[in-house]
Amino acid sequence: MGALSKLLAIDRRIIFLVIAGAIIIALFLPTGLSVAKTPPVKSIYDKMESLPPGSVVLISNDYDPSSKPELYPMTYALFYHCFKKNVKFVTMTLWPGGELLMADVLSEVLKEKEFKDKKEGEDYVFLGAKVGASAVVMQMGQDIQLAFPTDRNKKPLSDLPLMKKIKTLTDLDYAVAISAGVPGIDTWIVYGSEYFRKKKPKRVELGGGCTGVQATQYYPYLDSGQLNGLMGGMKGAVEYEAHLGLKTKEMIEMDAQSVTHIIIIAFVILGNIAYFITRKSRGNK
């Protein structure tokens, strides 16, 4: 029982070193673990795939740099998917701190050779940031130009070819809210759903993306149909990238996270086995 007793008394710093070592090795030597594809993420992907070329999607990116590791990849994947499918999109943020992040994502996606011909104002519109949460969403439901008279570059929306046929939220074919909190998904569900329902013959569906710790609070919205799909945390982002066939650094980071979880689970199992065996041994003495 000596080895088991030593296992129970192991210095926590050794555990930290083992986990740190595993993370470093996994980052530099990826294991290539497969990513399980779950229905909530696939629902968003399938909806995007079902849209015919020329459709228009709203992508609201309501987060700031503190949530970049989890949510930035979702935005990238959605922009990439839109361009790949020749689906046009309007993007914005209800968080002032998110505007520069959105500009960064756009510039990254536009670096892809296959998207060099995409034109702002025709293939996509970047509205920028607007504070006001529910008031902004309700204004957009009545007239998008009430909320955003100009785009981020101060060009009047009335002069942009894409915005000539998109006057209100009811003119959209799909919407996705990527959120780190409030305002975000909740705001679009509560205040945007009234306008999304008005589209005939079928309402505009809403998809969502959120940080990992938020995901469970949005599952009821999936069951009720208020969200047609959900990407939760980095895993959700990597799932979507996997559907697109992308190879990104987030997949390597997900590898490191998975390996870490496996090691932690192994320590928990071994610790419990050692505890019960040694306790039984002490009870027999």
Image: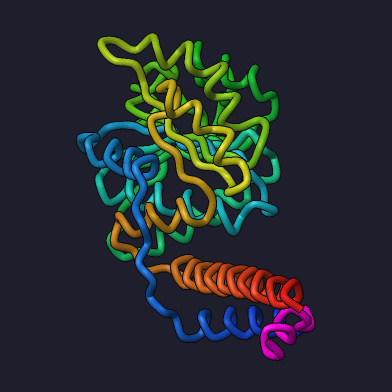
90 in relation to 195, above or below: below
Residue 4 covered by magenta stretch: yes
Drawn side of residue 157 relative to residue 69, left or right: left
Viewer-side residue, 195 vs 255:
255
The residue most toward the bottom is: 2
Q: Magenta-highlighted stretch: main secondary structure?
A: helix
Q: Is residue 128 visible?
A: no
Q: Name above or below for residue 79 compared with residue 135.
A: below
Identify the residue at horizontal 69%, vertical 24% (top origin).
132
- Residue 242, compared with residue 61, is above or below; it is below
Q: How is the image coloured?
A: rainbow
Q: Which residues are magenta?
A: 1-12
Number of marks: 0
Q: Could you tell me residue 30's position as x and y percent?
A: 44, 80
Q: Position of residue 110 (x, y in %)?
A: 40, 58
Left or right: residue 188 compared with residue 76:
right
The residue sitting at 48% across, 16% down in the picture is 193
Q: Quadrant of residue 72?
A: bottom right
Percent from the top left, x then y, of residue 133?
A: 66, 25
Image quarter in which the C terminus is found = bottom right
